[in-house]
Amino acid sequence: MQETLIVLVVFVAFAVLFQRLRLGTVLGFLIGGMAVGPWGLRLVHELEAVRLLGDLGVVFLLFNLGLELKLERFRLFGARVYALACTQVLVTAAAIGALAVYLGLALEPAIIVGGALALSSTAVVLQVLGDLGRTLTQLGRLAIGILLVQDLTVGPLLVLVNVLSGAGGSIALGLLTALAKGAVVVFLVVGISRYLLPLVLEYIAVVASDEVFTAATLLIVLGASFATEEAGLSTALGAFVAGLMVADSEYRHQIAADIAPFRGLLLGMFFLTVGMAIDLDVALANLDRVVAIAIGLLLLKAVVLYGLARALGYTNRLALPLGGLLAQGSEFAFVLLALAAQTRLLVGPEVQWLTVAIALSMAITALAAALGRRQLDRLEGEASASLTDLDARTAELHNHVVIAGFGQVGMALARHLISLGIQVLVLDYDPKRVRSSQAHHLPVYFGNAARADVLRAAHVGRARLMIVALPSRTGGERVVRLARALYPDLRLLARVPDEGGVSEMRAAGADAVVVEGLTTARDLAERAILLYEPDEPAAAS
């Protein structure tokens, strides 16, 4: 009990501290784990229970990764983005692997080290982009496209670690085996996700309670993990496959909301255990090597990305910050290195050196982003508000109306409601439109309403009404479904382009639907007034 309390105190304290410092919770958990672990202050000695929770955290991390990899997301990026992403992974992995062999590492572990270090940290990069307000700029879109391709390589790398650690034959045979297993996995994903899983989830959603649906979600994650482990692969790969199975289903947003608390807590435990497993004596005794690895990794990846971006026709102004943004190591490298050590593919102090170096590269990236913010603003202009700013600037709102979309309809609707004295908060995905609206003192904020973290930052849970004024039926339905999953008691009003979308929008959770026409904004405003019923105490105040 005492050690459990210590772990929880460290979890909360370091998460809060490093979020305040804008260095990211990943780095906070690593440092917190090192501080209280067996090679730090020695406050925690029994790591098995924490390590078990950490392993579950990895399972949920990979499940969430699969859940995010919807096919439609990949259609948003052009061929040039994928060319840059694929060549970056291959060239960086080959360069690092060749350097590892030159320094004395065997070929098999060098392949894994090269692949692991070629990846960039999704957690760090997304946080930096959010803090800088660059998520939807050209830099942000390009970085996210590259991260998506990198994330796709995690599954094959997990398979490859298991194959190379037990193949006992040629690497070509190991790669062929990995390819065959990957083909089987893809076949199973397509078959199960298309024919079986939707029927099971629909039956559970209809006849059972919310708690049973959450339990079914956990069963999918852990069951798939257990199945792949029994097949000789990793539990993390099974979770990744499970995420892919439900990524294109209508239950995706509900499942993402259900697992969010588990994923965040257990993933934090994983990074704590990584920090606790770091032998500080070894790290300090080899501090020069650790620093050299971190600096070398940052420089190598930055140069490779910059050179490839310039070769593919991207401007110097875009290629330079892109190289710096994606130069750090990845949280998935911790997973791959830990698995390589567990399977005895990678032995010796190299695992310790690499783990500390990756953490150090993350810290350097976060610090460099904070220090380089003014220079970036000078190049591109000031960015839109981050989620943290959105949360702070709307903290006092209560019983307000949230409008998703600030096109012509959303603009007319917002002006009408404001003229009636109703508090309005508008979320829009166009940074230029947001800047222009804020310059005219309109309550428009930058954010994708189809993301749970944006809805939370806008305090949708305290709103009396949300109006989805997006012109796209698919986009509007996605927002409605997510908002209904997160806030069951919220009143939802939606716009659809034609009569055919009314039933789908109501099935997604909308309380009222307005069909596109000449008076769409007025019709939405009339319905909004009927649905808007503020609490008496809040209205009086």
Image (cartoon, rainbow, N blue to C red):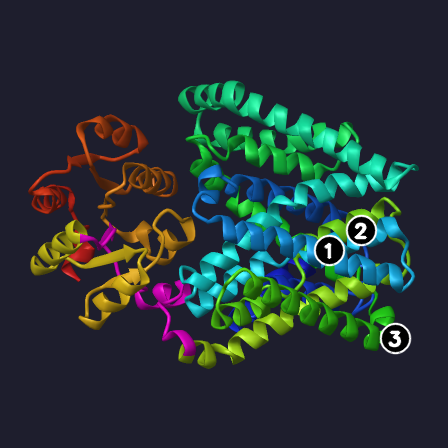
Dot 3 corresponds to which residue? Answer: 285
Give the residues in magenta.
379-407
- Residue 109 image position (x, y, % from top left): 85, 51
Q: Amino acid at mark 2?
A: Ile
Could you tell me which secondary element the residue under label 2 belongs to?
Answer: helix
Q: Position of residue 206 (x, y in %)?
A: 40, 21
Q: Which disc number belongs to residue 93?
A: 1
- Towards the viewer: 4 or 406: 406
Q: Tell me whether circle 2 and circle 1 mark residues in contact (CB < 8 Å).
A: yes
Relative horizontal placement of residue 348, taking residue 517 as reference (left or right): right
Q: Earlier in the sequence, mark 3 or mark 1?
A: 1
* Mark 2 neighbour density, 10 Å: few (under 14) some (14–19) many (20 or more): many
Q: Who comes first in sequence, dot 2 or dot 1?
A: 1
Gap between marks 2 and 3 measured at Cα: 26 Å
Q: Which mark identifies residue 111?
A: 2
State left or right for residue 66 relative to residue 276.
left
Label 3 residue SS: helix
Q: Is residue 199 above or below residue 435?
A: above
Given the image, on which type of amino acid does mark 3 rest? Answer: Ala
First in sequence: mark 2 vs mark 3:
2
The reply to whether the C-beta atoms of the residues labelled 3 and 1 are less than 8 Å apart is no
Give residue 428's position: percent from left, percent from top: 29, 56
Give residue 62's position: percent from left, percent from top.
62, 43
Count the marks: 3
Mark whose residue sits in front, 2 or 3: 2
Left or right: where 118 falls relative to 123? right
Give the label, 3 or 1, closer to the camera.
Answer: 1
Q: Is residue 533 magenta?
A: no
Determine which of the numbered discs, if any, sits on residue 58 in the image: none
- Quadrant containing the C terminus is bottom left
Q: Residue at x 87, y 51 (%)?
A: 107
